[in-house]
Image (cartoon, rainbow, N blue to C red):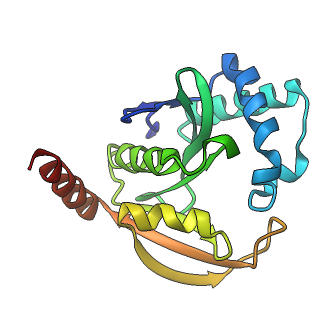
Amino acid sequence: MRVLPESMPAPRLTLRRWVESDVDAFAEAIAESVEHLRPWMAWAANEPVDRDEHLARIRRWEQTWAEGGDVGIGAFLDGRVVGSGGLHWRAGPDTLEIGYWTRPSCTGLGYATELSAALTSAAFTVDGIDLVEIRHDKANIASQRIPERLGYEFVGEQPDEIGAPAEVGIDCRWAMTRDRWATLQAAMAEGEHA
């Protein structure tokens, strides 16, 4: 059983697995973000939910992670939730998919890019992971900018079920290999020291 990382380093953010004690901060972030997320995230259609449902969700995530499944990561800045992400076993035993969102008051500040870069690096610490993917609906241009900024390669499009109101039903797939990520990170480090 491969257990996914429960925390990861990032330049500005504290990135760690959601735990029960985060329930109120998590609920507050969702409450601010629900109208921002509803067009793109199917689960947001059920919001708002009460505190007990948020707590149950976090408990399910904790159990899933402990059993070797997906991990949900909270992104915090000075103790405040700026967003969330995760590593997901959706594409096979050698591939992880990452997902991410930021609350509306935190968009445009590079947090989603920072979170996604940290998730990518963390994914490649897992034995046997050779590929990381980002997928988004073609209409979600904001999500598209993240893999572009990080140097992911566009793999292609395919029809997909429409799960949220703003989606057009075309899944865009981006991929990053372990070797490509190592090369990009080395080039970035070299550029910082030049």
Q: How many marks?
A: 0
Residue 70 in sight from this viewpoint: no
Report x, y in % for residue 74.
58, 33
Report x, y in % for residue 126.
36, 44
Which residue: 80% across, 66% down?
Answer: 163
Looking at the image, residue 158 lies above or below residue 84 = below
Residue 20 in sight from this viewpoint: yes
Looking at the image, residue 66 lies above or below residue 174 = above
The residue lying furthest to the top in this view is 21
Relative to 11, 104 lies left or right = right
Which residue: 45% across, 79% down?
Answer: 155
Report x, y in % for residue 71.
56, 39
Residue 84, image quadrant: top right
Query: Camera-side residue: 40 or 36?
Result: 36
Which residue: 33% across, 60% down?
Answer: 130
Query: Camera-side residue: 155 or 71?
Result: 155
Looking at the image, residue 32 lies above or below residue 137 = above
Relative to 65, 130 lies left or right = left
Report x, y in % for residue 148.
43, 68
Which residue: 84% across, 67% down?
Answer: 165
